[in-house]
Image (cartoon, rainbow, N blue to C red):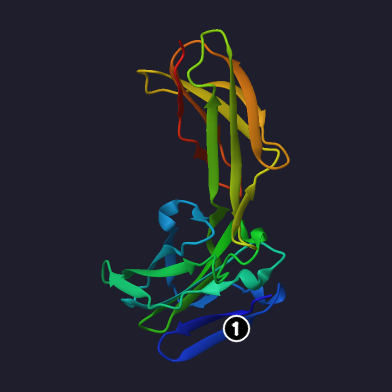
């Protein structure tokens, strides 16, 4: 289990340091002093964080806070995911920039990094799901506020979907076999593996049209593979479409054209 640390500064003097090595260390408490408030927290523009097997994913976090004493000085940002491996807790190593919106309100931003190669944030597949964003903000008069779950956000395993319709060309009235595969990132071996027993729609777009319609829904098998048949009727594109799940984003395969003669 990877241990990570969380660092916070209150005003310009008090430093809080905690080491998270298990579930117990992951449970911080809300607290604060004075009348400082956290007004808004946005992670990744409100969209889920989707992580594959190779690329580092930077995630922008913004925290807007107010205090009657003036400028909000320092923001601490940390995020941690679902169990059982609470060593998924991580923290912003870079500088956090605060920009004053008024005499009482500032918005502070930082960037959190998910790195599948080093396992930062995503060292286990169980990291996929709902994460909590913890933040601490301090003001010029040393008022401070800490929220252990200022907001929540989704972290998901990148998904892939393929399709192949054959034979091509095909005579009208004959059978078309449509195969494909639904897979998703595995953060424990940095490979893609089939996503099993998932409902996937077979869709068709007639040549000259911009709209796909659903033909049928099937489920991926024990290796993530997809296979079904349809009757050839007219030229067009077949694709598979997956609506997504709590841990995996939606994905559409690129349409495969079939010439019906």
What residue is drawn where x is 51% and y is 8%?
A: 172
What percent of the width, then of the height, locates residue 124? 65, 64
Q: Position of residue 175 (x, y in %)?
A: 60, 15
Q: Measuring 58% from the left and 60% from the top, which residue is drawn there?
A: 131
User: Visible in this render: residue 194?
Assistant: yes
Outermost residue on the bottom side: it is: 13
Percent x, y for residue 86? 67, 70
Image quadrant assignment for residue 96: bottom left
Quarter of the figure with residue 177? top right
- Badge 1: residue crowd in 10 Å (few <14, some 14–19, many ≥20): few
Camera-nearest residue between 87 and 238 = 238
Residue 27 visible in the picture: no
Residue 199: x and y in percent read 64, 33
Residue at figure coordinates x 59%, y 17% from the top left: 230
Which residue in the protein does label 1 denote? Answer: 18
Residue located at (32% from left, 68% from top): 105
- Residue 88 vs 46, above or below: the answer is below
């Amino acid at each position: 289990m990877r241990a990570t640390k969380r660092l916070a500064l209150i005003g310009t003097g008090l430093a809080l340091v905690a080491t998270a090595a298990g579930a117990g260390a992951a449970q911080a408490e809300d607290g604060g002093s004075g009348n400082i408030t956290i007004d808004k927290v946005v992670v990744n523009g409100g969209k889920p964080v989707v992580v594959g097997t190779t690329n580092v994913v930077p995630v922008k976090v913004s925290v807007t806070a107010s205090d009657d004493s003036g400028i909000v000085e320092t923001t601490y940002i940390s995020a941690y995911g679902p169990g059982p491996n609470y060593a998924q807790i991580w923290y912003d190593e870079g500088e956090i920039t605060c920009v004053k919106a008024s005499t009482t309100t500032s918005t502070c931003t930082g960037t959190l990094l998910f790195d599948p190669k080093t396992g930062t944030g995503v060292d286990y597949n169980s990291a996929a799901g709902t994460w909590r964003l913890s933040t601490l903000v301090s003001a010029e008069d040393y008022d401070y506020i800490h929220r252990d779950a200022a907001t929540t956000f989704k972290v998901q395993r990148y998904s892939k979907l393929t399709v192949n319709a054959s034979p091509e060309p095909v005579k009208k009235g004959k059978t078309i076999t449509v195969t494909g595969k639904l897979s998703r990132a595995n953060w424990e071996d940095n490979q893609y593996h089939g996503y099993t027993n998932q409902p996937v729609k077979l869709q068709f777009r007639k040549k000259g049209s911009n709209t796909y319609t659903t033909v049928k829904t099937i489920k991926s098998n024990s290796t993530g593979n997809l296979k079904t048949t349809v009757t050839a009727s007219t030229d067009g594109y077949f694709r598979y479409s997956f609506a997504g799940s709590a841990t995996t984003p939606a994905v559409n395969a690129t349409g495969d054209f079939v010439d019906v003669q």
